[in-house]
Amino acid sequence: MPQFINDSQRGIRPHTGIGPRWATKRIVPAAAANSGECVVSNDSIQCYMLWIDGIGAWQLYLGHSFSIGAPTFEGKSADITLQANISRRHATLQYAADHWQVTADHQTSVSGRSVDSATSLRSGDQLSLADRVKLGFHVPSILSSTAVIDFESTHRPVHSVDGIILMVDHCLLGPGRDQHIYCPDWPDIVVLYALEGSLRCRSSLPLKVDGRPPSDSAPLKDGSIVDGENLRFRIEEIH
Amino acid sequence: MKFTFVPEASPLEGYTIKRAIHRGGFGEVYYALSDSGKEVALKLLHNNLEVELRGVSQCLNLKHQNLVTIFDIREDRDGDHWIVMEYIGGRGLYDELQRYPNGMPIDEVLRWLSGMTAGLSFLHDRGIVHRDLKPANVFCDQDTVKVGDVGLSKYISESRRSAQTQSVGTVYYMAPEVCHGRYGREVDVYALGIILVEMLTGQVPFDGETTAEILMKHMTTDPELSALPAPIQTVIAAALEKDPKNRIQDVEELEQRFRDAVTVMAPVDLELDSGSSSPPPVSQTKPSIAAGKSVTSTARPPTATVIGDYWTKLPALVKWIVGGIVTVILLEAQVLSYITSGAFLGIFVYTGYLAVRYLLKPKPSEPVNSKDLPKDTNVESVTAQRSDPDTNSSQPPPLRRQHRGTQQFDCLSPATPRAISTRQRISDLVNSLSISLAATCLVTLAVYMTTNLLHEPVHAVFFGSVTMLGAWALLILSKLREGRPAEVFMRRVMQGAFGLGVGFLAAGLQNYLMLSDDPLLHFPDSDGKPWVVGRIHLADGSGYPTLSAFMMFFGILFAARRWWWQADSFRKSRFRISSTLVTLLAGAVVAGLLQFPGALGATWALAISAVVQLSAAWTPQAERLLQYESSSLPLTGGRSRKHASVTSA
């Protein structure tokens, strides 16, 4: 058994200086901002990092419409930014009327077919931006409309992530290949879901969120650590 | 899996841990960001020793695109050492191997091989040997293959503590000479050879239940490469030579020879790929070289293997019951003469088959037909995939232990040459002979009680005495020859000679006990004519065996079976019912051949087999390697203590 060392011994400290920009502020209701809750509002997109021990890192977006583009140093970047030679707003992914579609602002193709108007996406399609950026589009679970984007070319966001979750209703993490995040050694599924504008989690496993059992009344906060017998992940809000 | 540090911990000034990546043999690895946002991997070294840190620091300034860059070595407030190194995203070779349980497409194999070779070649050129090359240490970042853990491998050989925490994964790739404490770049060639086999077939060539068993196979067993095309077999076999002097000397040569072997097959590959009309499976875009063979063999296992597997899985009690039933049926149902006739017919047909096969077999010196061989394998491969495109993804990923059962005992069998001290031999022998007394009584009692063979106590005395004599002869001979290099023919000849002696004594005892015309020894099918071969009177026509018949019976019975496989301390299991039954049949056949009383002959064979197995010394699998190692000291000029520490892991 590894030796567990408490945080104070190991010196956990908040980020300072020019550090990674995971934590700049975004528009959230004042009450929620004060409490640090992860708030989901209908008219804005929320983005989180899921840091999963032994598994990887995923960007999780909540909303129904997501723009994709290159990062910009001035003005507003696209929702999903990729370090690639593409436009600042290259295409937009939308979930409406029970299906996903892509709207191209610049050269985009879906599974080899060039598209210029709104085009439906099916699970397994390959999205190609400016010919060189290849993204896989999957809706792995029949229980959820949430989509997963994986990187088929070498283009990535600024930091290494294993994939992007476009969360419509639920995000399933667990030992099945049909879960949004495949965690082969986990004993059971953990479900992330949005309720009353906040992100929460649920599982049949005995989990603890920041040391307390999860409940519908206890939303996940920015920086919350979800801990179980054989799993641990941290949620961090990105702005 | 629990890790020491929680997310957002900052054990090293300037770095914040974001998540744990994995826990390996050397310690925990974390993904962290520097204060300015640079991604790094932080490796916490548990139990670090100075010598290990020296190894890493020697590699600190090596720069090569195919090596994972080490940025720094830092010490935290608690005095633990951390290696700060390049973070590699993307899948490692280990993960890729999980995706291809039946072997990777050849293009992928060449891509990984090329990157590994470049990285290792750079290290070798600077006088550094990696020594811990394994799939878990090979990564791919943005299409560039990178070899990691450079300089850390001293953990394996020089630290007893780390040997205990070392993962078994390392042992799969460990060259035989690592156990002796001698290292050269050939160990990396060997590891690369093993990885090549794993990439091509999805399985490591040497697998086992324990670290010791795997190490033993590295040292003694030839790799099973028959699933690979012949040109590739040759290259891999040269890379996996046990003796580093005979092995391919550097990784570049291995890569070149491998590419040459693949080039020979390339036209056929292309032809098959273009001819495939069905879309390739998602997880595997091209047929792997070895996939076809393994899939085919999985789909249609030979009947004998199925029966063998079924027998192996039976509980011991059921085996004993079945064995008992078969024995009684054979002895009581008067079917021995049919068995004898059937066996003769079978032997005759089999001899004819062998002769035909020998005549039709192509000469081994014939040059390999470079087109036919790969074509065969690839045709199987494509066929298998067409019929079931999801074969690869639907199979459970770990196939490493597929061959267990057939290979497990190859390297620790009675055929393993080993040094055994005279004292040990004498001690084992004295024990065996003592135990054989009790075993003989037990077996004789069982025969007396359960069959109608022995009617009177004197029969039991005669039967038991001869059984014990036979068992002693075989135990003594086997123990004298145990561990010596296999000379099967000579051993059989010697056993035959001992058998003649036992037969002579048995005939003498028969006279002494006045059993010469006892019904016990009557051969009912006697035709009343004497049977004389030269000066040997095999039968005198009376229906009772002659002295010659006794001697010939035991002589042939002893020569016919590999009795040392029943008496050797490295035999498969202490008591094998199947061996006993086969011996019983052998006894029946030999008795039938010589007009010797069939039931008595068969029962003697069974009883001797039982007594030999019950009383011969036996070493459990787990202890064999240690026994082998300690006994082999004088042969190898002193194995290092280092190996003992590895094997004790």
Image: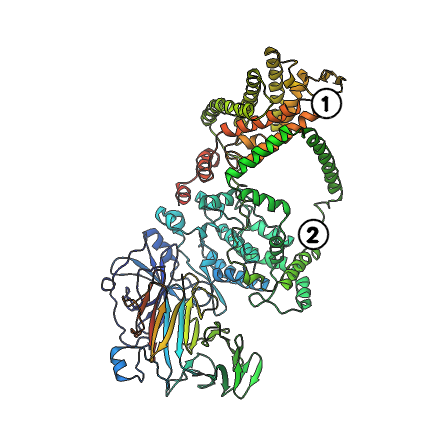
Q: Is residue B560 visible?
A: no
Q: Chain of mark 2?
A: B
Vertical order, A154 against B603 (above or below): below
**x then y, percent, for residue B616:** 50, 28
Label 1 marks which chain's residue? Answer: B
| Residue assigned mark 1 | B525
Q: Would you say B266 lies left or right of A169 here?
A: right
Q: Amino acid at mark 2?
A: Val
Earlier sequence position, callout 1 versus callout 2: 2
Residue B155 in sight from this viewpoint: yes
A138, B194: nearer the viewer: A138
Identity of the residue drawn at 76% across and 20% down: B527
Mark nearest the camera among 1 and 2 is 1
Quickly name the residue at label 2: B368
Q: Quadrant of the C terminus of chain A?
A: bottom left
In this picture the colour scheme is rainbow
Which amino acid type is shown beneath numbered disc 1?
Asp
Q: Position of residue B524 (x, y in %)?
A: 70, 21
Q: Nearer the viewer, residue B341 or B405?
A: B341
Which residue is found at the position 31% from the left and 60% from the top? B4
